[in-house]
Image (cartoon, rainbow, N blue to C red):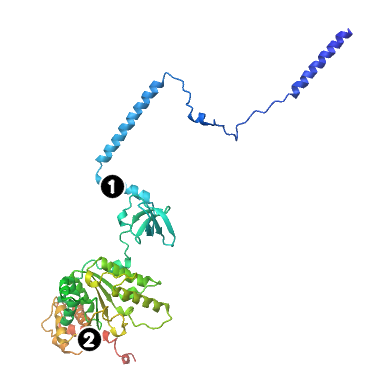
Amino acid sequence: MGQQQSAHGHGFNRDKKDDKDKKRRYEPPIPTRVGKKKRRAKGPDAAVKLPHITPHARCRLKLLKAERIKDYLLLEEEFLKNIQIAKPQEERQEEERGKVDDLRGSPMAVGTLEEVIDDTHAIVSTSVGSEHYVTILSFVDKDQLEPGCTVLLNHKTHSVIGVLTDDTDPMVSVMKLEKAPKETYADVGGLDNQIQEIKESVELPLTHPELYEEMGIRPPKGVILYGAPGTGKTLLAKAVANQTSATFLRVVGSELIQKYLGDGPKLVRELFRVAEEHAPSIVFIDEIDAIGTKRYESNSGGEREIQRTMLELLNQLDGFDSRGDVKVFAYIIYFFVIMATNRIETLDPALIRPGRIDRKIEFPLPDEVTIRKIFQIHTSRMTIADNVDFEEFIMAKDDLSGADIKAICTEAGLQALRDRRMKVTHEDFKKARESVLYRKKEGAPSGLYI
């Protein structure tokens, strides 16, 4: 019995030990895949090893389906090609232009081409002064690319996407008259000697340059017209431009005075460059005394800028550019300068010396014969009464200019319209003459206002 108890006690102890072993056994945690990448097979064998493919009964059907899809895609491609061919050429060009515009982007920057490296690369400079090594897109016309030209740049990559063919200053474009002036020599009363001189100086070299070549002389480079206001200087310049069918550029001297430093000389260079491009041409600079006055020592920045503008004008009249190379002389390219001023005594001697301004033409106040011709020109289309006697106005010593006579005729017509009449009488001309002289002499005497 004691043995049975002992055996029973040993069995109980063994069960108890097994339970402890079960509790002490280590169980590893379940692995997680968060933050771990799957390892890839490395080595040359893994790169060239073919995947294992198990044949399937439906493989043949899949192949037939893929071939049929390919046939449909080829048919669609051929159909689209035929549509493009059948499209009108204008629509295709419009689509191509749209694609080019997409490549260019918007807005487009403007830069200056400094150097062409090869057909696809160039160096450009922007307005801020920085230089960039950029690419030239394939649709850009390479023949128009030359150092110094203005190019269009993509606003992100700065690639050259176009060339600005007409980079003329807008102010110079306004100076160029698109249509020839309508004034002719018949509209100029009198001034026979002045017309003859300007024909020899400007018109003849433009129409018959071979005469000067046979004589072995050079025609004048420039002509200056001077005289009292209203004596027909601008009118005669327009008549010359009409007679020669030359490009006429008209600029007032005050327009060459610019606000910022260097803009005045730049405008002068641009003016002469446009004149050379549109040769034969005539550059008419009215009121030249605005920039051509005598030089003197001045501490004013504005005065020094005006003097620099005049120096650039002298440089252009000499026939040499800023690089020192001899350019084509004016008599070869038939390019002339006509200046006009009311005060020639105030001009700088270097501006009007021979070689720059070779011919000086004076416009005096009209004499009796000239006044009679001017009255005939301005009254040719007016309805004149029988009692009008122009000799009274012709013989009067009023120092009338051509502009004053035109103003008298216009004022007389307005007097008739004010009285509801279609004919101009002698009394209308008398009132018009008094009105014009009153304004010309700057009003009534001061004693009238006492």
Label 2 amino acid?
A: Glu
User: Which SS class for mark 1?
Assistant: helix
Which residue is rendered at x = 35% and y = 29% of the image? 70
Mark in the foreground, 2 or 1: 1
What residue is rendered at 33% in x and 50% in y? 139
Q: Nearer the viewer, residue 369 or 294?
A: 294
What residue would you read off at disc 2? 434
Quadrant of the image containing the N terminus = top right
- Is residue 320 visible from the viewing direction of this image? yes
- 6 horizontally vs 308: left or right: right
- Labels in figure, total: 2
Residue 2, percent from left and from top: 89, 9
Give the residue type that dot 1 points to: Gln
- Nearest the viewer among 249 and 150 is 150
Q: Is residue 7 left or right of residue 363?
A: right
Q: Give how far across and how far down residue 101 sits, in percent.
A: 35, 50
Specify the quadrant of the image occupied by residue 351: bottom left
Q: Which residue is mark 1?
A: 93
Q: Is residue 192 above or below residue 262?
A: below
Specify few, some or many for label 2: CA neighbours under 10 Å numbering under 14, 14-19, or 20 or more: few
Q: Does dot 2 land on a helix, a strand or a loop? A: helix
Q: Position of residue 181 (x, y in %)?
A: 20, 70
Q: Is residue 182 visible?
A: no
Could you give the CA–CA distance between mark 2 and mark 1, rounded to whole angstroms?
69 Å
Picture quarter with the C terminus: bottom left
Pick the residue in front: 280 or 415.
280
